[in-house]
Image (cartoon, helix red, strand yellow):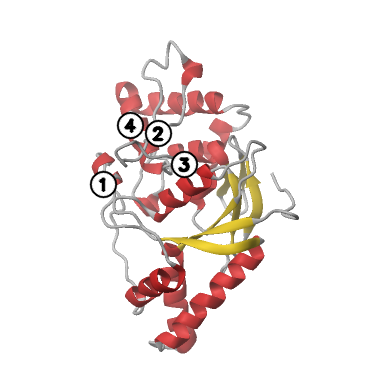
Amino acid sequence: MKTSLIDKKLTALLDGDILLYEVGFASEVASEGVPSFDYVKDMVDSRIQNICALAGAHFPPVVYLTGKDNFRYQIAKRQPYKQRAGNKPFHYGNIKAYLKGRYNAEWVDGLEADDLIAIHQTKEMNDDGTSNTIICTRDKDLRAVPGWHYGWEIGNQPSFGPELVTPLGRLSYNAERGKLEGAGMLFFLSQCLTGDPVDSIPGIPRVGAAKAFKILDGSQTYEEGFKRVLGAYRAFYGDAAEEMLLEQGQLLWMTRELNEDGSPKLWRFIEKIQQRPMDTSPL
């Protein structure tokens, strides 16, 4: 749902993890080698200013980073979470220190930047479905969170928004690109079907974007979409369907709230879904 940002006074919630890699590697390409950090920090400042301007954010941004460890490591049983090797740019540590010193970047050990952003935006939701904040990231996972969103263009990846995401959201299939496009709970449910290979979340084998869209197309409520996803899991996993879906959903779910002890509230569904199919609820 696209809505004008005129007269909205928003605070940008910036995904610092994206900036660490994006600016770090872009600066190396631009300078054809290892650049000076003065060059890099100028690029950081310019990128943040540009993102905030395009997002229509009026107040200083809040930058979030991922802390040490991750609660999802304990949830992942089928295969280790984020089991992948990755190179870091030369100035990775310096950019992180700069984001903390210059922009007061926040982090919490055990949680990802995505979780902290989702928690913040959830707290800033208004009764009319708008938010006082706008999530600024290129990470599609956060698009399941209601409220304002913006993703900047880079390379062959188009920009996203600014867009106001509703709780149910939307889902479409881009046949030309072979990809699902969407937001809200419908997009989250599609991820439960396809998984996320970048984060080592398998979903249902051989269920790609086109098949996931076919399964969910026409769903009018979250409950209806959930039952379709559970049915697909049961068809593939049999008696292990509920256990497998719960694991995949909790890995994909961006934490919206914390428990009193500071642990994340995990996504869940009613155990006896056969008897009470309408009582599914993300918590």
Residue at 55% across, 73% down:
47
* Cα gap from disc 1 to disc 3, whole angstroms: 19 Å
Upstream in the sequence, badge 4 or badge 1?
A: 1
Q: Tell me where residue 234 sits by quadrant.
A: top left
Upstream in the sequence, badge 3 or badge 2?
A: 3
Q: To which residue does mark 2 refer?
A: 267
Q: To which residue does mark 3 refer?
A: 191
Q: To which residue does mark 1 refer?
A: 73
Whether residue 238 appears in this view of the structure is: yes
What is the secondary structure assignment of the residue under circle 1? helix
Q: Please identify the quadrant where the C terminus is shown.
A: top left
The x, y position of residue 155, in whole percent, is: 56, 69
The x, y position of residue 182, in whole percent, is: 59, 45
What's under tag 3, amino acid-wise?
Gln
* Cα gap from disc 3 to disc 2, whole angstroms: 14 Å
Vertical arrangement, residue 187 with respect to residue 177, above or below: above
What's under tag 1, amino acid-wise?
Tyr
Q: To which residue does mark 4 refer?
A: 244
- Rate crowding at label 1 as few (under 14), some (14 to 19) or many (20 or more) other CA atoms within 10 Å: some
Residue at 35% across, 40% down:
264
The label number, if any, that marks residue 231 in the structure image: none
Whether residue 204 appears in this view of the structure is: no
- Rate crowding at label 2 as few (under 14), some (14 to 19) or many (20 or more) other CA atoms within 10 Å: some
Q: Judge by depth and name the residue closer to the eye, 251 or 54.
A: 54
